[in-house]
Image (cartoon, rainbow, N blue to C red):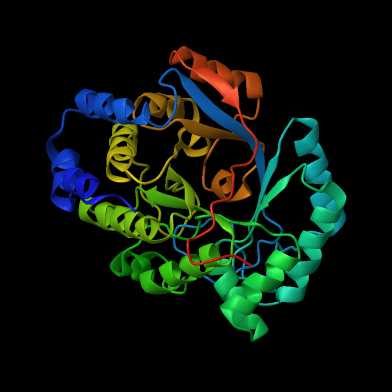
Amino acid sequence: MPSDTANAMRLTDADALELFHRAPLDELCARAHAVRGTFYPAHAASYTIMRIVSYTNICVADCLYCAFYRRPKHPEGYVLTHDAIFAKLDELVAAGGTLVAMEGGFNPHLHVEHYEAMFRAVRDRYGDVIEIYGPTIVEVLFIARISKISLEVALRRLYDAGLRWIPGGGAEILTDVWRRRLSPKKYTVAEYLDAMRMAQRLGFGTTATMVIGFGEECEARVEHLRHIRALQDETGGFASFLLWTYQSDNTALGGARTTQEDYLRTVAISRLYLDNLPMIRTSMLTQHRDGARALLAGAHDFDIPLEDQVTQLAGAIIENNINTVLGWVRSMGMTPMKRGPLARVAGRSGTL
């Protein structure tokens, strides 16, 4: 937890809003880059090669911003077999990848036993060669509910099956007003934070995310950052923070994508505001080559995804040529440094 002196120097919500509305972008990015240098070498950027495997597209969350999901009984609905998952992971390993995010929304037909079998199968086949970033915490909440068990029991069972990470997806914008507008079935802010707190207490590594570009006010973004910083003060459990942008193609919500300037400004403010979080990550997935510019605006990490059907169906263009992406980074004057999965940081309340 930050000291009283550190707290006195922290950005307040009013400070952050002032930066959103009035700070010249170049000055803001330079300030964030200087802070970035206290966490990671100023002329280097870390990265990992990964794949997002959507093991099912059947979902009843009905999020307005999602172009990927299909309702139960839809002819395009699917659940991947273990062999289909293995084929994707074999390609990931061959490309030098070390991380798989496995996410699938709210499928009412899949109970906790399905996830236990899936994670055990992946862990048995690949050991620690690939780290599994498993369901988001809102998905685990749904798994617990549909399986008629408590969240703690669900988390413990998934941990015993080989899952070690809960990614920050499902947060979108952590204000109850915007959650009701975008995805009212995805739990409240308090439910989200309480569940993430429990995952950290039980020893899971966790990451934080925010999605921007829905039309939300800057105040909503600052509230989101405040929730993340407060929980990090309490537990120290977040290993990183990733900012990405809403992709609007083929969605019920529609609308236009936010600008690159807006993305850079929000990355920079996130780096300045989240003073207790070691890693800010830029999204090559949603920003493509422009994502490399955020490495000069406070971010120091990125991933190279081989696949993400969720964002691809909403219009994201994936560049999975690793050398091409690394070339974007070098063009920013950065030296890319490949890393493995992040070290888990358990919450202060104890572990399994």
Q: In this view, does 143 lie above or below 276?
A: below
Front-most of residues 68 and 211:
211
Q: Where is residue 338 in the image (x, y as percent from the top left)?
A: 62, 27
Q: Position of residue 62 (x, y in %)?
A: 50, 69
The image quarter in which residue 157 lies: bottom right
Residue extending farthest bottom: 148
- The number of numbered discs placed on residues in the rendered structure image is 0
Front-most of residues 287 and 130:
130
Q: Which residue is drawn at 82% across and 40% down?
A: 90
Q: In this view, does 164 lie to the left or right of 282?
A: right
Q: Is residue 122 left or right of residue 25?
A: right
Q: Which residue is drawn at 71% across and 77% down?
A: 109
Q: Residue at x 15, y 33 (%)?
A: 23
Give the quadrant of the C terminus. Answer: bottom right
Q: Which residue is drawn at 34% across and 41% down?
A: 258
Q: Position of residue 12 (x, y in %)?
A: 17, 50
| Residue 196 visible here | yes
Give the quadrant of the N terminus. Answer: bottom left
| Residue 216 visible here | no
Front-most of residues 26 and 299:
299
Q: Is residue 226 above or below residue 105?
A: above
Q: Where is residue 119 in the image (x, y as percent from the top left)?
A: 76, 60
Q: In this view, does 170 lie to the left or right of 120?
A: left
Q: Is residue 112 left or right of residue 350?
A: right
